[in-house]
Image: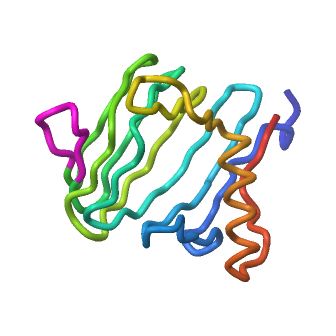
């Protein structure tokens, strides 16, 4: 390999991508989508009392809590600042935020299958859907189209 032909690292500064309100005062930022790998990386800032619909993951998910506290309704443990969480493919849970200003990074592979009370799939969210929703929310909130790291 010739000098200078190596892939370059990509840096995204903390303020380069905006957070958007997802409708309940909680915030979302989409950082990266790699369609070919089924990978999507998001950063959330949740408000206390926020509950994310019960869902099943089709691929593994890695979560890192930066601040605040949240849990899954189905489990006893609480994720706090510094907590790391691994969710295997097929896991089912309902996220509940228990402290304001809870900040979590999620590295997600595959899709989230949002479930109704009987366990039927109501909605499928993958990286492309999350990205399109993020762009739409940016536009609706008067923000310029963000330069999310997107790869096929």
Q: Is residue 13 left or right of residue 34?
A: left
In the rendered image, the vertical position of residue 39 relative to residue 131, given as above or below: above
Q: Is residue 71 left or right of residue 133?
A: left
Quarter of the rendering occupied by the C terminus: top right
Q: Quadrant of residue 2?
A: top right
> Which residue in the rendered view is the most extreme toward the left?
76
The image shows residue 86 at horizontal and vertical percentages of 34, 28
In the rendered image, the vertical position of residue 105 relative to residue 11, given as above or below: above
Nearest the viewer among 99 and 15 is 99
In the rendered image, the vertical position of residue 100 relative to residue 70, given as above or below: below
The residue at the point 65 percent across, 48 percent down is 130
The residue segment tinted magenta is: 70-79
Q: Quadrant of residue 121?
A: top right
The residue at the point 23 percent across, 44 percent down is 71
Nearest the viewer among 40 and 9 is 40
Q: Is residue 150 left or right of residue 65?
A: right
The image shows residue 28 at horizontal and vertical percentages of 53, 61
Q: Is residue 46 left or right of residue 98?
A: right
Nearest the viewer among 15 and 112 is 112
The image shows residue 115 at horizontal and vertical percentages of 47, 31
> Which residue in the rendered view is the most extreme toward the front?
118
In the rendered image, the vertical position of residue 45 relative to residue 133, given as above or below: below
Q: Quadrant of residue 124?
A: top right
Say whether residue 72 is magenta.
yes
Structure colour scheme: rainbow
The image shows residue 3 at horizontal and vertical percentages of 84, 38
The residue at the point 67 percent across, 79 percent down is 141
Say whether residue 86 is magenta.
no
């Amino acid at each position: 390999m010739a000098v200078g032909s190596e892939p370059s690292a990509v840096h995204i500064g903390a303020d380069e991508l905006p957070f958007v309100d997802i409708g309940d005062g909680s915030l979302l930022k989409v950082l990266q989508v790699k369609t070919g790998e089924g990978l999507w990386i998001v950063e959330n800032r949740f408000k206390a009392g926020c509950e994310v619909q019960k869902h099943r993951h089709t691929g593994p998910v890695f979560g890192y809590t930066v601040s605040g506290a949240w849990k899954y309704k189905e489990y006893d443990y609480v994720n706090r600042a510094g907590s790391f969480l691994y969710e295997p493919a097929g896991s089912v849970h309902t996220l509940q935020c228990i402290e304001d200003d809870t900040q979590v990074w999620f590295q997600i592979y595959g899709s989230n299958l949002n479930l109704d009370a009987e366990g039927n799939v109501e909605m499928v969210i993958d990286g492309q859907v999350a990205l399109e929703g993020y762009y739409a929310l940016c536009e609706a909130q008067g923000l310029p189209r963000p330069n999310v790291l997107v790869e096929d």
